Amino acid sequence: MSRVLIFLSVFIVLTACNQQKGTGPIKVGTIGELNKAFENAKAGDDIVMANGVWKDVEIVFYGEGTKEQPITLRAETAGEVTIEGASNMKLGGEYLVVKDLYFKNGYSPSKALIEFKINDTLIANNSRITNCVIDEFTQADRDVTDHWVGFWGRHNQLDHCYIAGKSNFGPTVRVFLKGNEHINNHHQIVNNHFGPRPRKGGPHGETLQIGDSYTSMTPSYTNVSNNLFERCNGEVEIISSKSNFNEFSHNVFFESEGSLVLRHGNYAKIDGNVFIGNDNSKFIGGIRVVNTGHWITNNYFYKIKGNEFRSALAVMNGVPKSPLNRYNQVTDVVVAHNTFIDCISPLQFSVGVNIDKKDVLPASEIRSERPERFVLANNLIYNQNKDNHPIKAYDKVDGVLFKNNILNSEDKSDVTAHGFITKDLQVDQISENLFVPNQNYEDVYHGFDFETITQDIFKSDRTKKNAIGAMVLPIKDNTVLMDKKLYGTDWFSNEAPEQNAETIKVASTDNFQDLLKRAKSGDILSLEPGTYKVNEALIIDKNITITSANVEQKAILQIATEVNAFELHPKGNLNIKNVVLIGDNTQKAFATLDKNMSKAYDLFVENSEISNFKTVLEVSKGSFADTISVVNTTIKNSLNGFLLNKETDSKGDYNAEFVLITNSTFDHVQNNVLNYYRGGYDESTIGGNLVLSNNTFTNSGKGSEILIENIGIVNVDISNNTFKNNPVKTIAVLWGEKGQKPVDNNIQNSGEIKIEQNLKQKLMY
């Protein structure tokens, strides 16, 4: 009898345990089966999506798991379940886990791809997205706004994911604080790899936004730690913190054209982060400071060459009695124990001061309040090439206390303070991009609450030994700043395999277009001497080079009536070298699609001739070129030149990032040689780059009052050009406030280059 009782007891216990843990993996192969599994889900269930393509699926995952027994939705094999087409996912309930999924080849049919709520009452808490990839899951129309991960509720987590390639409006990841159930949320965004976000050419291209202007005074307590931000170039704000008590620690920002921005909200902690720039870009930034109560400690900045908004440390002026959506005064901030290596003028104060613009801006935009009760102490600045201007101040710095900062260059800044000490400082290279002083400088300033800075950037104990700068010696020999293997998923790599470019010989019109269609990205089409009649548009949807086999006998592309020569598609990269393009004044030499230019394109023209076209380049609204480069090229006998002017709604957008025209000739272009436009008062982007250098412009602009339109473009270089016999009153209007001025141009019978100091623009906010 006792044996029977023991058997029954064991059976009951095992059965209860099995019920608690679920019934084992529940494999589903269709959306119907998946929905059924959700309906019956209980704590501990393991729902497994069968390998394959799940297309046009809107997944609504509701369940009530527990901390010990969450409900899991996962791929049968990590990375082998792809979510494609018009698809999205919503979560609601408690303790849900989504893992191992691959989102690609699609877009969200709603405002979010993944959202931690189903509706305003079914909200997810204590839930997690992990080991997933979202790759170029972007809208076909770049003007459509969405975000890829939307945080609601409390205690939710995004970790070990790879997320990259968003090119349309809206932050990649966004935290919402609209309602008491979403504040004090303690969300965790950790151990992710945020891969390249391409330049957007307008605002609203953040990688991460926490809160917004109108909830910016609420506590969020979101933690963003141990993430890699790799070439996140969407706009000036890589991270936009717009709420209180957020923490940003031990993240790496690698060659990302923007900054970690404390845009709204107070009491942020920024500790132990790494900002890596390079010698090629002046748009890579560091940390921008607005508002109150932040502690910025133990951060390492390397080769940050940006200025003002994109400087290594940009401390802004505020607006008196600022509305929520503008700039509050910086007060009660501590910046201590940071290291700046080979950065240009890394410390910039009163950035954005604009008192001189009161004639063109309303009072709500005038930033006149200087930082107050600001402590800058125990920081280390080293430059291999001497930088005698470590500080830039655009206003007085009477509210800043400088203490025990050391540098290796003599400080000749307008701001000189006893708190900057020049020493014979030497550094040693430990690993790639990591340079450390060859000795500890232990004369640290002990300010109020500085005893709370208990560790350095590598988590060494400062309470036992302390030093100026971000690190305390000794440093372990194998220490590195960035190991990509530590971020993102355990199954995906964004390292593209090398492709061997093939040179394809083209000898006749008959096979030209066919060979172009069949060519792989990176291939070169080499045209034998002769005339190639083009009767339909040449589609460019990959990286392709078209060149002449014999530079002395350039191949001629003769374009049929009303046929655009080249049609530029998303991700198209066209290189034209040593080629002659001839139209009959009815077509465009280059044109984008009329719509759905979801991703950027590039156009490079070198040593070529373009003549007799209606328009050389015409683009569509929403299209965006990263680079348009014209070198050693002749453009003549055409109605219009380059028309990059379709973003006319004055919201800060523009049609190309870099327009570089050098050593070229323009003759008898009837209207604008170039119309490159950006409208709206916006400071969140690079703002466009125009270089016109060593060119000759003759007999052009007859049908236009101005030869070169460049309204609103921020970075303009017009130098060493010749303008001769162009029947216009104005060659160009430069924006004086941005430092634009003509240099060494030869102007004969061609009007003048004007300078307008403060350009009046439409407010966007």
Image (cartoon, rainbow, N blue to C red):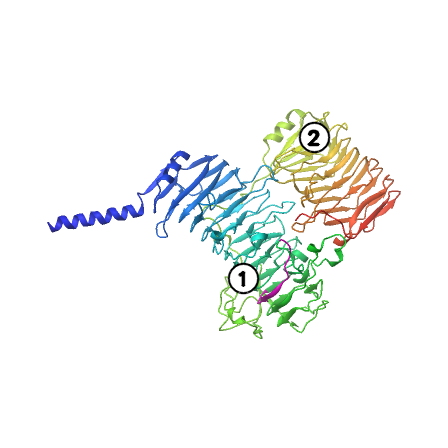
Give the percent coordinates (x, y) of residue 392.
70, 63
Pointer 2 with pointer 1, Cβ within 8 A? no
The image shows residue 308, relative to residue 680, as above or below, that is: below
Residue 332 figure quarter = bottom right
Give the percent coordinates (x, y) of residue 702.
84, 36
Residue 565 image label: 2
Q: Is residue 218 visible?
A: yes
Residue 269 image label: 1
For image coordinates 57% across by 40% down, the residue present is 500
- Please say whether residue 395 is one of the residues in the magenta stretch: no
For image coordinates 58% across by 35% down, the residue present is 520
Q: Residues within 10 Å of mark 2 (few under 14, many from 20)?
A: many
Instruction: Identify the amino acid type marked 1.
Output: Lys
The image shows residue 705, relative to residue 374, as above or below, that is: above
Of residue 736 and residue 389, the one placed in the foreground of this image is: 736
Which range of residues does the magenta coloring cover? 325-338
